[in-house]
Image (cartoon, rainbow, N blue to C red):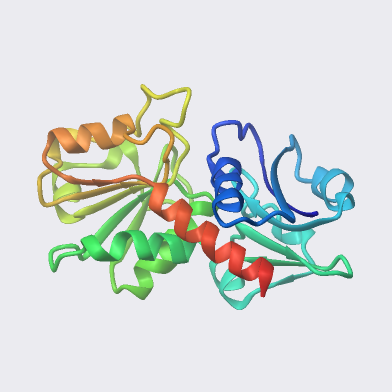
Amino acid sequence: MRRFGLIGRDISYSFSQNYFSIKFKDEDIKDASYENFDIENINQFKTEVLNQDIKGLNVTIPYKEEIIPQLDSLDKKAKKIGAVNTIKISKKGKTKGYNTDCYGFKKSLKPHLKKRHKKALILGTGGASKAIAFVLKKLGIKYKFVSRTSSTKADYTYLDLTEDIINDHKIIINCTPVGTYPNIDNAPDIPYNFISKKHILFDLIYNPSETTFLKNGKLKGAKIINGYDMLVFQAEKAWKIWNK
């Protein structure tokens, strides 16, 4: 039996295990299983996960950056991005990190882009946001990072966001876990009253399918996109990497 899985912290909300379980059943893949590895500390990756004869892993919050020093090598794209969400483990036990988030995000966003979508606000500065910034740069879309507190990583704090800034950035992407189940009433603290029907609001969260962030955008007529298609695209890309 080939074992695959997801590592992260507090990941009971994740659909990845369910997605792969259904995939294996639908495609009659009988020699594979997928499980969650909920770890409190990244050091448990080597001591409690790698010693279990795993063939491949997905990586989620908060370890997409922390995992890098734990790996033997990185794919070129993952190295450029500075974040990993997929790991392939060779027969000899060597680990190689990849980023399939960038593929999933690009495939999800690109069909919805119009000429007016030239600038974006990225909410959050963690590992997920790095893949998003990588894709936006490739698409020729300028972006700024927004965080709760001032730092060298962020261009704005939430308190800095004015009507002009919101109007100037017609794409807003939530890369934070704010609003994830079970805390579904929470949302990033942006001035939603300045959102218009010309905006795209993209939430990497997919559980719930319509977060408060997206609901607030929908009320203003914005195009809203959740993270489910991105999850599917990146998962299928990961499956190809594990099996090539």
- The answer to whether residue 99 is visible is no
* Residue 92 x, y percent position in the rendering: 89, 70
- The answer to whether residue 66 is visible is yes
* Residue 102 x, y percent position in the rendering: 46, 64
Which residue shows up at 86% across the image and 55% down it?
A: 53
* Residue 138 x, y percent position in the rendering: 37, 74
Q: Is residue 138 above or below residue 12?
A: below
Q: Is residue 35 above or below residue 67?
A: above
Which residue shows up at 30% across the image and 34% down it?
A: 213
Question: Relative to the observer, which residue lies in front, 128 or 109?
Answer: 109
Which residue shows up at 28% across the image and 41% down it?
A: 160
Which residue shows up at 31% across the image and 34% down it?
A: 210
Describe residue 197's horizontal placement relative to residue 103 as left or right: left
Describe residue 97's horizontal placement relative to residue 118 as left or right: right
* Residue 72 x, y percent position in the rendering: 80, 68
Give the residue at the far front of this rendering. Answer: 28
The N terminus lies in which quarter of the figure?
A: bottom right
Question: Relative to the observer, which residue lies in front, 158 or 5?
Answer: 5
The C terminus lies in which quarter of the figure?
A: bottom right
Q: Is residue 170 above or below residue 158?
A: below
Question: Relative to the observer, which residue lies in front, 31 or 46?
Answer: 31
Describe residue 9's horizontal placement relative to residue 136 as left or right: right
**Quarter assignment of residue 205:** top left
